[in-house]
Image (cartoon, rainbow, N blue to C red):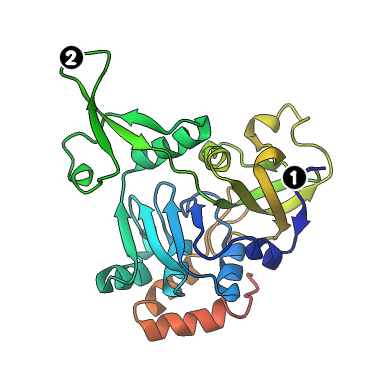
Amino acid sequence: MGAPYVSVAELAERIQDGSLIALPPDYSLVAMAAVRALVRKGVRNLHVLGVPVAGFPADVLIGAGSVAAIETSAVSLGEAGFAPAFTRAATAGTVRVIDATCPAIHTALQAAEKGVPFLPLRGLLGSDVLRHRDDWRVIGNPFAANDPIVLIPAIRPDVALFHARFGDREGNVWVGRRRELATIAHAAHTALVTVEEVRGESLIEDETLAPGTISSVYVGALAHAPRGAWPLGLLDLYPPDEAHLAEYARMARTAEGFASYLARHVLGEPVPA
């Protein structure tokens, strides 16, 4: 037997207060149905890891008061503009912001994936980000003279949370070319996944699908959630709801507007068109 299928609410219940939760960027496979369920659950003190950038789901969680810290290389709504809840919280100091870079985040996850305490990375040398990260270390290359290198400690999230085009009855999930999601799943203690569709046949046994499939070994539970990425898009299945994202960006500019958005679109489960 593979990972169990549960409801979206039950999936959210598996994420505890204070968890380190890894989220993919808005252009990837984002489990927005699960994020809304987390807000309705009232989760608190999350440490969010944007892999490698954060966007709409992180902004919603921050605005809802669910996030204590966020580590990422950027927070943005993309074409919809800046992330208003994040900007407000960062300015007020109510959320701890840990600056990183895209390569550093991927390197930290790859270290955890490989089961090693750190991995080296060169491109950070001389950067302002490096000066503000006491947990990153610069050492001399042991195999060459006068060759400094940065060591990035492994990051092992408690939960990797993402959406997938489909899963099978064994709990395997297909993410296609989004192989960064496989890295997150391998690095995390567990992956919790919502899926558009549940297939009866094994994805691992299909030669064309197996290369883009994450094994159920890394998946703790799944939930069937059609249009579960909405209002963000999913691969070639449906595009982002640009009008909804623009409405969010407008409403969330103020705390009162965000509260209104939350009441209208999150606390009561929305029904995407």
Instruction: Locate residue 78: give its quadrant.
Output: bottom left
Say which mark, if any, is on residue 145.
2
Disc 2 residue type? Ala
Instruction: Locate residue 272: give its quadrant.
Output: bottom right
Determine if residue 77 is in view. no
Q: Nearer the viewer, residue 234 or 32?
A: 32
At x 15%, y 18%, the residue is 146
Work out which quarter of the rendered image holds the C terminus and state it: bottom right
Instruction: Locate residue 94: give its quadrant.
Output: bottom left
The percent position of residue 158, horizontal first and vertical second, equals 54, 51
The percent position of residue 129, horizontal first and vertical second, equals 22, 46
Say which mark, if any, is on residue 70.
none
Work out which quarter of the rendered image holds the N terminus and state it: top right
Under circle 2, the secondary element is: loop
At x 53%, y 40%, the residue is 187
**First in sequence: mark 2 vs mark 1:** 2
The percent position of residue 111, horizontal first and vertical second, equals 45, 33
Say which mark, if any, is on residue 171.
1
**Mark 2 surroundings: few (<14), some (14-19) or many (≥20) residues within 10 A:** few
Q: Nearer the viewer, residue 46 or 9?
A: 46
In this rendering, is residue 216 above or below 144?
below
User: Is residue 172 left or right of 141 when viewed as pictured?
Assistant: right
In this rendering, is residue 130 above or below 263?
above
At x 58%, y 68%, the residue is 38
The percent position of residue 134, horizontal first and vertical second, equals 25, 45
Determine if residue 143 is in view. yes
